[in-house]
Image (cartoon, grey):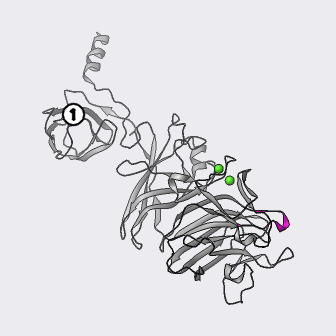
Amino acid sequence: MKKQLLTLLAAFVIPVLSFSQTCYPGWNYYRDITIDNTSGSALTDYQAGLTIQTGAAILAGKLNSDASDLRFSDMACNTLSYYMDSAASSNQNKIWVKVPSIAANTTTTIQFYYGNTSATNSTADGDATFIFFDDFEDNAVNVAKWNTFGTYSLLTETGGELHYNCVYEENARYKYVYTVADFTNRVVIDAGVYHDDQHAFGYASTDNLLSRIYQRPIGNANDTLRLISITDTTSNGSYAPGADDFPWIPVAQNTMNNLSVDVELVSAGLRFHLFKDHTSGEITSGPFDIALPGVTNSSGFKFCLSANDFFGSYSGLSYIKIRQGAELLPASSFSPEHLTTPVGIQSFSTEIIQVYPNPSFGDFTLNLPDTRHYKAVLKDVTGRISWQGTVEGKTGKISMTGISPGIYSLEIYEGTTFFQKKLMIQ
Ligand SMILES: [Ca+2]
Ligand SMILES: [Ca+2]
């Protein structure tokens, strides 16, 4: 008798599948990220910098140890590209997320999801996230990203770094390596840069590759000030500007410096907004306008490295990430953690909740168990939300116009009550 009763109940109760109010079925947690751009200009494909405590989430057992289950999406469930600056164990992990559109004078919401031990393939992707990216980790120079000007003797990728040096001649300053990509808008160049005496990094004009601005050491091997200056190639590669001519920017020599340069193409040269040495914490704020000699209508600039093998060493990069610059950076804030699956779901029998007619052209009537306000979400076969709204009263009506014909999953929930029904729209 008892067994018969259970069988009877089972026939009426709709099995509750994993309920997900999300873009990623199978993920346990998500947070909303509100990007406040109320004081800024509209941004497109903008790399928003977020600090996320991935290490704490791993310790709590909510994130895979390599963060392979971390996902970002916009509210239309488009997966967003991202890149993590630090190892997953970091509690101050700077994560760059490429946001398709951030309107001016408003806030934009995106989400991130985590908590799926089956998600073993990380979607982190520097090339997809940044305007230009290289981490030099595969021991092969990517010739689609790097080109050389003049004769060179050394351009290698080794030990996670790009190394450059040239055959020594008097005019070694006419040889260098540069990014194939051109940069035409304001960008922030984040790079690990190594240079010692006689070596420099800088910016070449796309119009005239011999026209460059270099940031290079002043002094020589005996230099104890460890300064670099912004100087130009019309001074014959020398570095003896007057004290007032250029900004002086302290950077440790003979070490790999972690730098950020906020630089913009202007009509006849470059405008430097900010230079930051993350190793020393030194910051130099602009703007400084510096001409690219001979350039009047530049179509862009390239990042470059020069070297002179006089001392037999090299200039180098351990990584480079180039992202959009902006005058006013949007601020970001995080919601508390949400569970994608409400706790204590109670499903209802087909007798209690009814949806009809089914199929229909988009207008449905629902018989609900009580008069609470229920939330209704319609998802297509890929799990994307096609429609959402609320249903009131014991007999509610929903009207979903403009939905493409097809098979959908309708989810009705309020508190711990959950109901799911397959709908067909004609
Ligand atoms: Ca490579
Ligand atoms: Ca590297």
Q: Is residue 288 shown in magenta?
A: no
The x and y percentages for residue 285 are 60, 79
**Label 1, ligand 1: CB separation under 8 Å:** no
Q: Is residue 142 visible?
A: yes
Q: Is residue 421 above or below residue 156?
A: above
Along the viewing direction, whichever of 210 and 123 lies nearer the viewer: 210
The x and y percentages for residue 179 are 60, 62
Residue for point 20% across, 30% down: 352
Badge 1 marks a residue whose secondary structure is strand
Point out the residue furthest to the right here.
Answer: 222
| Residue holding disc 1 | 423
The x and y percentages for residue 257 are 71, 65
Picture quarter with the C terminus: top left
Q: How crowded is the residue under tag 1: few (<14 C-alpha within 10 Å), some, or many (20+)?
A: many
Q: Magenta span covers which residues?
A: 306-315
Determine the image quadrant of residue 400. Answer: top left
Along the viewing direction, whichever of 418 and 252 lies nearer the viewer: 252
The x and y percentages for residue 77 are 37, 47
- Amino acid, disc 1: Leu
